[in-house]
Image: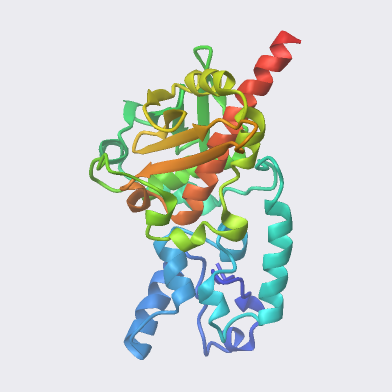
Amino acid sequence: MTTAACGINCNVCRLQVMGICSTCGSGLSPEADHKIQVQEHLFGQPCPILACAKANQIAYCMRDCHAFPCESFSRGPYPFSQGYLDMQRRRRGQHQNAAVIPSQGIIVPPEFWKNLSQKNLADLCDIALARQENPESLTMDFLDTEIQVRPTLRQCFLKENGVWEPVNHPLLELLTLVYLLQVKPGWLTNDVVAVQDLKDAQFFQGPHEFKTAMVLEQFGYDIEGFCIAAEKLSGVRVHMADIAYKLRPFPKIPLYFLLWKGDDEFKPRLTILFDRSIDQHLSADAIWGLVNLVCELLVQQARQDVNTCG
């Protein structure tokens, strides 16, 4: 793989062609491991971009990482100009302001499936709180249903009305693989924290604020509708705010949705809380994507009810 995690194509670099410099490879490649070892030996530390991509299971920053362009690129001087980075931020920000999280255009890196297929599924089930119902797959709870992952087929399936149906939502597939690749041993702390308490709190600002506007628009003045939607996703009522539910998209990832109803004097408010352990199991961009996905699913529940009534 001759494209580096940062996006440089080493095939068109004369240093690579002459054998003077080797490619870094993607963040999931053996070349990345080798390059990091060489950099640590020669310079005392690796390239921060490559090291971050490897640590967070990111193949290519520009394609796979929601945080791109991050501080590692901005600090420079390599590999892109500030003008290029500013353009990326501007144009990505325009698309991230959409009301609904797009499922089209998301690509699940093949390396994710390759890495998952190399794991011992029995051991992974213990860590991820999943179930191994046959040697070729693992199953875990996902909100109100179950999701089954079959590494040999490179497919995920959702149980719908008792039947396993292929997942046709790329973001859900991607987040499922990220959870299984990143989840760590250990239990929930039951210490509930806000986003500003997470270790990468600065990530969730500006274009990376959670897309809660869609939930407020749908339920800000409709507490009953919010209760119905949350309970359809197997939400558990908790005593916080005007109304609050704990939703569990993945076994080790509870999300707390706290809603304050709007009235003539105050606008509605929505806060999302986490178990303190979440950033041990998911990178910041995965947390961002998962929260937005659950927001989307909550709104979809309400829209399905309207369509059914109509």
Residue 299 at x, y = what percent?
A: 62, 29
Report the quarter where the C terminus lies.
top right
Position of 141 relative to 106 (above/below)? above
Locate residue 137 relative to residue 301 in the image: left or right. left
Q: Is residue 34 visible?
A: yes
Locate residue 276 relative to residue 296 in the image: left or right. left
Residue 40 at x, y = what percent?
A: 34, 83
The residue depicted at 67 percent of the width and 34 percent of the height is 217
Position of 120 relative to 11 (above/below)? above
Residue 29 versus residue 61: which sits nearer the camera? Answer: 61
Count of labels in the image? 0
The residue depicted at 41 percent of the width and 42 percent of the height is 273
The residue depicted at 35 percent of the width and 78 percent of the height is 37
What colour scheme governs how the chains and residues are painted in the rendered image of this protein? rainbow
The residue depicted at 61 percent of the width and 85 percent of the height is 17
Residue 122 at x, y = what percent?
A: 27, 36
Rendered image quadrant of residue 129: top left
Residue 235 versus residue 293: which sits nearer the camera? Answer: 235
Q: Is residue 28 visible?
A: no
Report the quarter where the N terminus lies.
bottom right
Position of 218 relative to 14 (above/below)? above
Residue sticking out furthest to the right = 310
Position of 169 relative to 199 (above/below)? above
Residue 263 versus residue 151: which sits nearer the camera? Answer: 263
Residue sticking out furthest to the front = 265
Residue 152 at x, y = what percent?
A: 46, 38
Locate residue 256 relative to residue 228 in the image: left or right. left
